[in-house]
Image: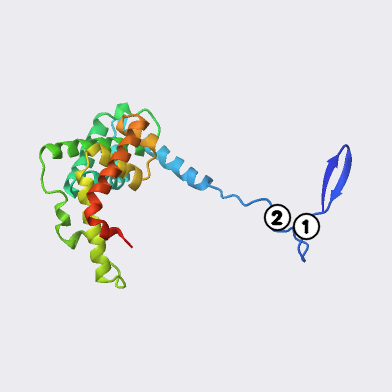
Amino acid sequence: MSERVDDGQVVTEAQDVDDRGNATPDDLPPARSDARPVAAAQTAESGIDAALVEEALGGRLEAFNELVRRHQDYMFSLVFRLVPDRDQAADAVQEAFFNAYKHLSSYRGGSVKSWLGRIAINAAMDIGRAQRRRPSQPYPEFEDDSWQPPAGDEEAPETRALGAERSKALVAALEALPIEQRACIVLYDVHGYDYSEIATTMHVEVGTVKSRIHRGRLALRTALAPNRELFRG
């Protein structure tokens, strides 16, 4: 039973109940997932980063070193697919942190993580453009299977071999793309950036990002056509 006030009169309404007298699910308010703990944690992390930037601006080198420790793994994973090998990815991350420290005063608030990420992507793209001018064997570590993560005992050798061949084909196709297209595709499809975030990171219009992704995907499809059998099933 429930009550409401109607024109000054208390009106009693019937409510569906089960055999135990409890309200049925149709009468219960919908459950809501509370994302506040996650948001609060992200806000706290951002606050720590911003405080470390302020300390580093004040001359405390250890504060910047703490930023490096907090974000170096993220930055490496961000640029690894944009450059030909791990050494160059590490170089891009090192260059990004150097530039971040040198231009620390250019930080204007917001997510420090995103700010560092944009610097890292720019460093990786610079390396990618230089690589175009001085071509070398791309991704030499893929010449054998030692780079592959260990597979479970239940995975058949044929499955592991197929996965390795797929990865090699994809890596070669990505490497053949212009660095601008490759960066947009990796940021969108691998790291989950949206168009606006990529546009901000790469200092271009959203339409340019969409165009690069579209042209890059068409080029990938053409490059992978001879290996289409690898991707069936």
**Displayed quadrant of residue 25:** bottom right
User: Gap between marks 1 and 2, in whole Å?
Assistant: 8 Å
Which quadrant would the N terminus be assigned to in this image? bottom right
Q: Amino acid at mark 1?
A: Asp
Direction from residue 131 to residue 57 in the image, left or right: right
**Front-most of residues 85 and 59:** 85
Direction from residue 38 to residue 202 in the image, left or right: left
Query: What residue lies at 23% left-to-right and 33% top-to-bottom?
Result: 99
**Front-most of residues 63 and 118:** 118
- Among numbered discs 1 and 2, the one appearing first in the sequence: 1
Query: What residue lies at 17% left-to-right and 44% top-to-bottom?
Result: 88
Secondary structure beneath disc 2? Answer: helix
The dot on residue 193 is: none
Direction from residue 145 to residue 43 in the image, left or right: right
Q: Are marks 1 and 2 in contact (CB under 8 Å)?
A: yes
Q: Position of residue 104 (x, y in %)?
A: 29, 30
Q: Does 57 appear above or below 88? A: above
Residue 97 visible here: no
Q: Position of residue 221 (x, y in %)?
A: 27, 48
Query: What residue lies at 25% left-to-right and 63% top-to-bottom?
Result: 162
* Residues packed near mark 2 inside 10 Å, few (<14), some (14 to 19) or many (20 plus): few
Q: Position of residue 144 (x, y in %)?
A: 15, 60
**Front-most of residues 57 and 125:** 125
Secondary structure beneath disc 1? Answer: loop
Which quadrant would the C terminus be assigned to in this image? bottom left
**Displayed quadrant of residue 135:** top left
Q: Amino acid at mark 2?
A: Asp
Q: Does 76 appear above or below 153? A: above
According to the image, label 2 marks what residue?
A: 26
According to the image, label 1 marks what residue?
A: 16
Query: What residue lies at 70% left-to-right and 53% top-to-bottom?
Result: 28
